[in-house]
Image (spheres, rainbow, N blue to C red):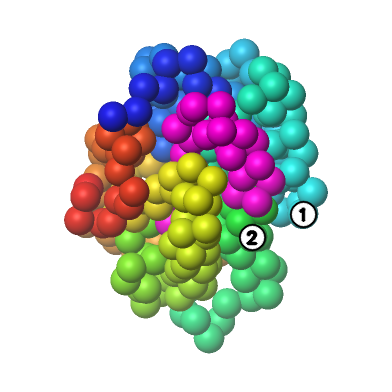
Amino acid sequence: MSDVTGSVVLVVGASGVLGAEIAQRLETSGATVIRAGRTPEHLSGADTFLGDLTDEAAAAAIVTAAFGVHGRLDGVVIAAGVVAFGPATEVRDDTLHQLFEVNALAPMRLIREAAPHLAASAAAGGKPFIVTLSGVVAESPTAGLAAYSASKAALAAFVQASSRELRRSGIRMLDCRQGHTETGLATRAIAGTAPAFPAGLEPAAVAERIVRGILDDEKDLPSTAF
Ligand SMILES: NC(=O)c1ccc[n+]([C@@H]2O[C@H](COP(=O)([O-])OP(=O)(O)OC[C@H]3O[C@@H](n4cnc5c(N)ncnc54)[C@H](OP(=O)(O)O)[C@@H]3O)[C@@H](O)[C@H]2O)c1
């Protein structure tokens, strides 16, 4: 079991529902949490940094700023994301760009930028981790969500492959593929309108499960884990 007491953890997307819930639970477990988000009014806490992940330079800037607070980084949670609905044949280029920048490319860049700091944490005796939230669509690409599913499947593939590389440096990766969760994400879609979903998972329960996965040294959280 991992003890996060005294660990420094960066939560990207801490301004979102799941990011905020995970950040708060990590703090309760004894971690020092550094929060990053896009919208200032959604963020609060001691060490907060703003960045728009559609900006190619944001990932490096966020990781550098977060590392600078305490001169170390022991964990990264990437909980930023956007969704879009609609037929695959009608998806617009700007929607494709935003989905892939925020859901796939920015997390890949964050992982790349954080890896040296996390490797240093492992070398110093820590148990560093990276958590991603690709969601059930990465396992079961869904009609009406083709581009969103593709962006999340890209992230899940990157995590699956890079986890085999990073574990040599002592870094554990944990991809979380929870199903539909009642965070209101669907109401903030960047394109299209959500169909009527059956009731989803409770955000608090999902965040609790993810933090348990971090603390219990789990290496994967498929949809069946939620
Ligand atoms: N809710 C679900 O059903 C569900 C299911 C499976 C996976 N997920 C994934 O879980 C993650 C968290 O989602 P959530 O449900 O908690 O939704 P949420 O409350 O809408 O949170 C989304 C977060 O992403 C941030 N974000 C969006 N665009 C950004 C950008 N361009 N630059 C920087 N940050 C950006 C938002 O920042 P601001 O609001 O501050 O702008 C917010 O912090 C997402 O990756 C989502 O795809 C959600």
Q: Could you tell which of marks 2 and 1 lies nearer the N-terminus?
A: 1
Please report the residue visible at 74 percent of the width from the left and 29 percent of the height from the top: 65
Q: Position of residue 226 (x, y in %)?
A: 22, 48
Write down the residue under mark 2. 105
Write down the residue under mark 1. 56
Q: Position of residue 45 (x, y in %)?
A: 58, 16
Q: Is residue 85 above or below residue 24?
A: below
Q: CA distance from mark 2 to mark 1?
A: 9 Å
Please report the residue visible at 49 percent of the width from the left and 72 percent of the height from the top: 150
Reply yes or no: does residue 201 show up in magenta: no
Please report the residue visible at 49 percent of the width from the left and 43 percent of the height from the top: 171
Closer-to-camera residue (115/176): 115
Question: For this view, does 48 lie left or right of residue 198?
Answer: right
Using the rendered view, name the quadrant where residue 145 is placed.
Answer: bottom left
Q: Is residue 60 above or below residue 140?
A: above
Mark 1 CB within 8 Å of ligand 1? no
Q: Is residue 9 visible?
A: no
Closer-to-camera residue (56/190): 56
**Disc 2 marks which amino acid?**
Leu
Q: Is residue 51 visible?
A: yes
Task: Tell me if mark 2 has few (under 14), some (14-19) or many (20+) residues whose alpha carbon lies within 10 angstroms of its own.
Answer: many
Q: Position of residue 152 (x, y in %)?
A: 47, 63
Task: Tell me if label 2 and label 1 are in contact, CB under 8 Å.
Answer: yes
The image quadrant where one finds the N terminus is top left
Using the rendered view, name the quadrant where residue 47 is placed.
Answer: top right
Secondary structure state at the residue bearing disc 1: loop
- Give, as a single range, the part of the protein colored magenta: 111-134
Give the residue at the far bottom of this rendering: 89
